[in-house]
Amino acid sequence: QTVVTQEPSFSVSPGGTVTLTCGLSSGSVSTGHYPSWYQQTPGQAPRTLIYNINTRFSGVPDRFSGSILGNKAALTITGAQADDDSDYYCVLYMSGGSWVFGGGTKLTVL
Amino acid sequence: EVQLVESGGVVVQPGGSLRLSCAASGFTFDDYSMHWVRQAPGKGLEWVSLINWDGDNTYYADSVKGRFTISRDNSKNSLYLQMNSLRAEDTALYYCAKGIAAATLFPFDYWGQGTLVTVSS
């Protein structure tokens, strides 16, 4: 069974830039996986950031951007702010109609 | 404003059954696919199931296949998840999520606040 991989944790300084990645235990992430990204703070429902690789959801600041870098999907935060301190999840579309989340990345801004 | 309100989460014994509901408003319900996503306490997100706009196509995670059934009633703007043969590992906060489009190739955008299912004796 294919596993979606994310860095367990990452840290960034306020104002800095960080790139979180989303890969596959076997194979490469491609456009056909329609990678999407979600942010979640403790006790809250997830918030949609990016879908279909690089489409920013309504109201999401342009410091968040999505792409495919090499064989992985990527979420880049440019000019990190304190309230970006959250968990970030990617999700990929798999053949047969199913979706699979990565394990999430805990981002610390300090 | 899009609103998704889940209900039906309770404490249930292993092997039991439960039906979750999600009441949708603020958008044309039958124009969109719908998903269920769950999150076990202290754990990450897990996609559970997907239904297309008219209910003709449904998909499930391997972990729930054969035990859970997703359905919808477009006349009532409601989504459902029938959960049978419940196990301790099904304990989680269950979120209803709106698909970005009618087609199942698109993920979800709006989320409800979740309903808690606890499977315990």
Image (cartoon, helix red, strand yellow):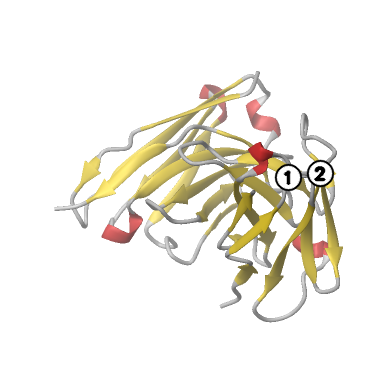
**Residue extending furthest toward the bottom:** A26
**Residue at mark 2 to residue at mark 1: CA–CA distance:** 7 Å
The location of residue B116, given as percent across then percent down, is: 35, 40
The location of residue B72, given as percent across then percent down, is: 52, 36
The residue indicated by pointer 1 is A14
Relative to B111, is A32 on the left or the right? right
- Can the viewer see residue B54 in this picture? no
Viewer-proximal residue, A77 or B116?
Answer: A77
> Three-letter amino acid code at disc 2?
Gly
Chain-order first, disc 2 or disc 1: 1
Residue displayed at 73% across by 48% down = B106
Residue displayed at 31% across by 53% down = B84
> Three-letter amino acid code at disc 1?
Pro
Of circles 2 and 1, the one toward us is 1
The location of residue A103, given as percent across then percent down, is: 55, 62
Q: Across the whole image, how many numbered discs are drawn on residues?
A: 2
- Can the viewer see residue B112 in this picture? yes
**Residue extending furthest toward the left:** B121
| Chain to which the residue tagged by mark 2 belongs | A
The residue indicated by pointer 2 is A79
Secondary structure, mark 1, is loop
Relative to A42, is B3 on the left or the right? right
Residue neighbourhood size for the residue with mark 1, other residues' Cα within 10 Å, grouped as few (<14), some (14–19), many (≥20): some
**Quadrant location of residue A22?**
bottom right
